[in-house]
Image: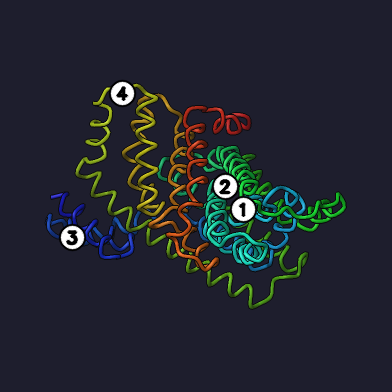
Amino acid sequence: MIWIMIFSFFILLLFGVPIAFSMGASALLYIMVAGIPIEMFAQRFFSNTQSFAFLAIPFFILAGNLMIHGNIAQRIINVANSMVRQLPGGLACVSVVTSMGMAGVSGSSVADAASTGSVLIPEMKRKGYTPAFAAAINASSSVVGIIIPPSSTMIIIAWLADQSVGKMFLAGVIPGILIGLIYLVTTVVISVKRGYPREDKPTLKEFFSSIRIASWALLLPVFLIGAIIFGIATATEAAALAVVYAFLIGLFIYRSLTLKNIIASIKDTVYGTSVVMITVCASMIFTWVLISEGIPKLIANALLGFGLPDWALLLVLVAIMLVAGMVMELVPNLFLFIPIFFPIATDIGMDPIQFSIVMLVSLALGLFTPPVGSTLFISCYLAKVGIEKTIKDILPFFFAGIVIVLLVTYIPSLTLWLPELFE
């Protein structure tokens, strides 16, 4: 019976039906064929979303949108510009560092790709960078948006895995920085090889001036994480405070928020939240059917039954997630893999927080790979280049990302040191 749902799911995907609707429709078909009361579909579709933790998602999205519409991106670009533009491929390096800074503001890779790319990609093309490389560097570096906290994706993982949001945020700091740094090194190496230009060396006065101007925006992640880890506020309360913070600095300090910008921020938040939650709801009902049929346990037992050593088993899990990240969106992948892979990880003694970050980083690489990479689509649109032309430029960043995935997988301290430090 379960094969009816799985088969129909993949058929719908092949016909181009969005993944949320594919999951929901195939689960509904299973329920109807199995003779389960149709009311169960509606109940399961909505019941698990009635969570206080999920309320943080629209708040984080709104805070990020207020920052972006308040021209915060340009101020962070100025900081990055004053730090690394003198390196080979200066503008490309600025793109990487800007994405790291924007990650702490927006918490969204897609928002980072759009806001940073709209400013830097045209400038990179003007300075002689190929459109394919400009798109590749913007798409790949923006993945840190969901790894460096705060991140709405981390809230979903923490809820699904029953883990602390504060610990999850702290665990993502070092891996996110490492991804940014390895992409910076990769960018410099490629730029030297291709002869991409350096920019003029910034002065100390320019550097400190850009830091001072952007300081209120850069303090947002510190404010958020500090409030959570020191018990001042829950993740949801901190997200609500972040909205107030973003509104106040945009309106009274930077004076860049207008009524038009505020309305646009609210509209984008409604759209973004709706996309996330419809995907979450559809994934929930799909996962519920799989769990009811015992599929996660069946797969877990099969993988454990191979008798592989722990390190090899982890490598298999990572490889599966890397491939899945390329062909499916991130949130549905989380709902599919957490029930299956978490029992395996805990059976071999891996810390749940560490495995959560391993899963997040592995799946995040799919954001800039075809055929469904959302940051890649946005970046190619901004660069006015076909996706197929960016593959050669994407590969070095994908392989560099795999290096970080393996480091995070086999060196627990990279994810656990900060959470343990603040216990």
The residue wearing badge 1 is: 99
Give the residue type at disc 4: Leu
Task: Name the outermost residue toward the bottom.
Answer: 260
Q: Residue at image x 15%, y 54%?
A: 4
| Distance CA(mark 1)–CA(mark 3) | 42 Å
Q: CA distance from mark 3 to mark 2?
A: 39 Å
Q: CA distance from mark 4 to mark 2?
A: 40 Å
Task: Look at discs 1 and 2 and give the one toward the viewer.
Answer: 1
| Nearer-N-terminus badge (1/3) | 3
As measured in the structure, the alpha-carbon distance from the residue carrying label 1 to the one carrying label 2 is 26 Å
Q: Are marks 4 and 2 in contact (CB under 8 Å)?
A: no
Foreground tag (4 vs 2): 4
Label of residue 29 in the image:
3
Crowding around mark 2 (Cα neighbors within 10 Å: few <14, some 14 to 19, many 20+) is some
Residue 207 is left or right of residue 411, and the answer is right
Give the x, y percent position of residue 78.
Answer: 74, 58
Name the amino acid, label 3: Leu
Residue designated by label 2: 234
Looking at the rendered image, the quarter that the C terminus falls into is top right
Q: Are marks 1 and 2 in contact (CB under 8 Å)?
A: no
Amino acid type assigned to the residue bearing label 2 in the image: Thr
Q: Nearer the viewer, mark 1 or mark 3?
A: 1
At x 46%, y 29%, the residue is 351
Residues 329 and 344: in front is 329
Seen at 65% across and 46% down, the residue is 192
Which x, y percent locates residue 25?
24, 62
SS for tag 2?
A: loop
Three-letter residue code for mark 1: Ser
